Image: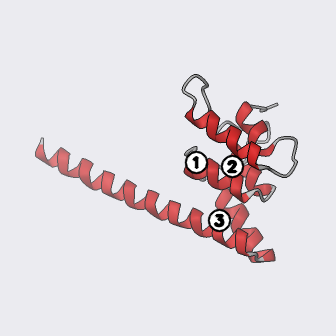
Amino acid sequence: HGETALRLAAVGRYEAPRDEHLAVMRLLFKDGRVQVTVDARDPLGRTVLWTACELEYYEVARVLLLEGGADHTIPDQHGVTVMELVRARVSRWGGTERRAFLRLLEVRASVRAVALMLFDSLASMLRSLC
């Protein structure tokens, strides 16, 4: 059913997250004895990050993104990414917390784009040297 330790800690049984949930998530990320697949999908193709954003658990989503390295570009089974989901909610309902998380996603996407561009430039330079 896509129930991993991380998913249970992050979104539980769809109950509002508490500090204990965040502490368990952080422990899972730091404990080398436990393999955590942060981008594992449930049967509907949703990652834990996607589900946290759908439930508007933005503190959980921040931990997944910034501490767990979750990939915000993975779409659900309908092709909807986390950024598209959050952007639609900001457009429809506004909200400070939604806007702040959307801004974090936008910055993350910009950094990723710049990193890929730099990597491509470096690879091109190395090929020209060979």
SS assignment at label 2: helix
Categorize mark 3 by other alpha carbons within 10 Å: few (<14), some (14-19), many (20+): many
**Would you place residue 110 above or below residue 63 in this image?**
below
Nearer to the camera, 113 or 69:
69
Q: How is the image coloured?
A: secondary structure
Residue 84: image location, x then y, percent? 68, 63
* Residues under numbered marks 1 and 3 in contact, where contact means CB atoms less than 8 Å apart: no
Residue 2 location, quadrant: top right
Residue labelled with disc 1: 71
Q: Is residue 78 visible?
A: no
Q: Is residue 22 visible?
A: yes
SS assignment at label 3: helix
In the displayed structure image, the side of residue 44 where residue 39 appears, left or right: left
| Among the two numbered marks 2 and 1 on one chain, the one whose residue lies closer to the N terminus | 2
Quadrant where the C terminus lies? top left
* Disc 2 residue type (three-letter): Leu
* Disc 3 residue type (three-letter): Phe
Residue labelled with disc 3: 101
Categorize mark 2 by other alpha carbons within 10 Å: few (<14), some (14-19), many (20+): many
Name the residue rendered at 68%, 53% in the picture.
Answer: 61
Residue 35: image location, x then y, percent? 60, 26
Residue 9: image location, x then y, percent? 75, 39
Residue labelled with disc 2: 49
* Disc 1 residue type (three-letter): Asp
